[in-house]
Structures are given as structure tokens and as C-alpha cells.
Amino acid sequence: MASPFAERGNAVDVEEGAEFAPKFDARGLIPAICTHADSGEVLMFAWMNAEALAATLHDGLATFYSRSRGKLWRKGETSGETLCVVEARTDCDQDVIWLKVLPQGRGAACHTGRKSCFYRIIAREGGGFRLAFSDDATPLFDPKDVYGGK
Amino acid sequence: MASPFAERGNAVDVEEGAEFAPKFDARGLIPAICTHADSGEVLMFAWMNAEALAATLHDGLATFYSRSRGKLWRKGETSGETLCVVEARTDCDQDVIWLKVLPQGRGAACHTGRKSCFYRIIAREGGGFRLAFSDDATPLFDPKDVYGGK
């Protein structure tokens, strides 16, 4: 199948143009940031290959590439926690994707059952650092119930 | 100098613990997402090595690792567009950093002079895609004035 994406032009084309020519890294992947479309909170970060990116933009449901499983991963296919894409953007270099999403299901985008993967704040302590759980770090589901022994 | 970060434990330690044990990739880098602390808008995405991450968390000024220049890069050192960090988080796997920042200078985090690097929306068009400039895509400075011939 022909690629739905444009060929990369020069820097001016990439930064100032209207052609979408995403840059995939040496592994064929591009990073994707998902934020909640209403609150702006960062929910998760994952990687896409060209097929996952095309599927996400075509269907409006966030789809990633699982590096550990080596295959396409429609977010929520096991948990029911799908992410509807209400807007997708790319950056100046077209090598990052930003998705504004509305979480479905219980609204827990993280595999730990939490709303967001970013449930811990980095705090300075002495010469080092500690993590403090945010106020909304309570899991909305028990991963054991959803993923079984996995 | 001893690392200010903890050793990585097992998955439960990493996901549910209070020790900050960031995971750097094979290149020694970790991705960092910067959002505006007030609006929630994603401003930029960049990479940090251990030294950049420690400097950012220690000093409260976003510092990255420039892959193209092969060195530490205090964001804004040339442009004046520094980013003050008001909160830093990590994700479940501790392999991504989220910084909530307040931009200084003219408030243009992007090297093109724009407020955010994510100034274009991906739109479906026919079987492919096009980019539409967002309403606030007007540059706040001319890169030629700031970076010269670079």
C-alpha cells in the first residue's frame, strides 16, 4: 500500500509547510504524547510505527506500536480503556506526535489502573530525589482483574 | 560524582515505589515532555541525558541533551527563551519525564519563534493528510534575529 504520508523535503518545507511528512527514527518509530483534551494533563507516552500512526489518524482511536510485543497495539483492546483522538498535531521537525484525547472506559489510561501514567511528582531530597504520589494516584481498576496474570 | 538517582529495582518497585530510578535508553537518553504549567499546552519535546536531568531538577531550569550538537543544552541559552520548571513528574515505568514549565523571555519555546513547537494540526484530506496552522502559530520572534545564520 502506498504511504499516506508525504516525502520529507528540506528544513523550510518541514517546518513551514502544509505537507505531513513525519520522520520515523532508525527503528521506524515516532514518539506520541497523549494529553487529556479537556484538562491538558499528560496521560501517557508511547511509540508509533507508520501503520499505527496512519490507523490512529484514520480511525480516531489511539493505536501504538508495542516494542515489547513487536506488534500494533490498539490502546484499550484488552482493558477497554480506549482513547478517542479529538485533535492530532505534529511539531516543527515533524518527528513527534501530540494527541489530544478523550479517555473511554473507566478513564484510566495507565496499565496500573490510574488515570494517567504520570502519577508521581519528582521531589528534591538532600542531594538526591524522591517520588511523591499525586492526589489523584488512586487506581480506578485493579490490573489483576483486567490483565489477569500478565 | 555519584549518581543522584536510585538503582532500578523490580517492576513493582519502579511502578509503585517512591525511589526515583529513571531509565535511560541505549544512548543514555530519556524523553522529556514540556507543557505550559498554566494552559497545559504541549510546548516542546526533547531528550535528556543523566546530567541534563539532574541539572534540570536541581536548578529548576529545563536543560536537555542536544543529539545534533552532542552536548548539554540549557534551553534558552542563545534565545533567552528559558523554561522555569514548576513541577516534574515521571511515568509508571520511569522512562519518560514530564515538566510543567513557565516560559520566560518572549514566551516562544520553539526555535521557529513560536510559542509551542506544536503549531500545526494534522487534518485528513482524501486518502492522506495535510497540516493546518493553528490560530496561535504566528512567530513571536524572527529566528534570523535570534540565531543569526544558524
Image: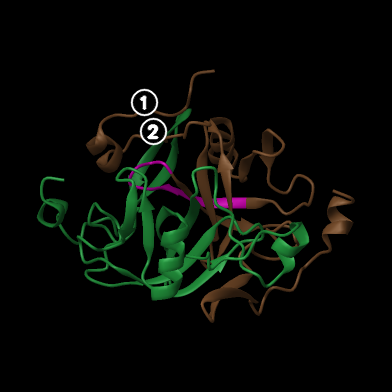
Chain colours: A brown, B green
Name the foreground residue: B140 vs B129. Answer: B140
Q: Residue furthest top?
A: A1
- Horizontally, residue B14 falls left or right of residue B74, namely right
Which residue is identified by label 2? A21
Look at the picture and state if A89 lies above or below A123: above
Name the foreground residue: A67 vs A87. Answer: A67
Contact flag, marks 2 and 1 (Cβ < 8 Å): yes
- Horizontally, residue B17 falls left or right of residue B91, namely right
Q: Based on the picture, tell me whether residue A124 belongs to the magenta stretch.
A: no
- Residue B119, x across and y down, in percent: 34, 52
Which chain contains the residue that carries disc 2?
A
Q: Based on the picture, tell me whether residue A92 belongs to the magenta stretch.
A: yes
Tag of residue A7: 1
Look at the picture and state if A143 lies above or below A69: below
The stretch of residues the image draws in magenta is: A84-95
Q: Amino acid at mark 2?
A: Ala
Which chain contains the residue that carries disc 1?
A
- Horizontally, residue A92 falls left or right of residue A41, namely left
Residue at mark 2 to residue at mark 1: CA–CA distance: 6 Å
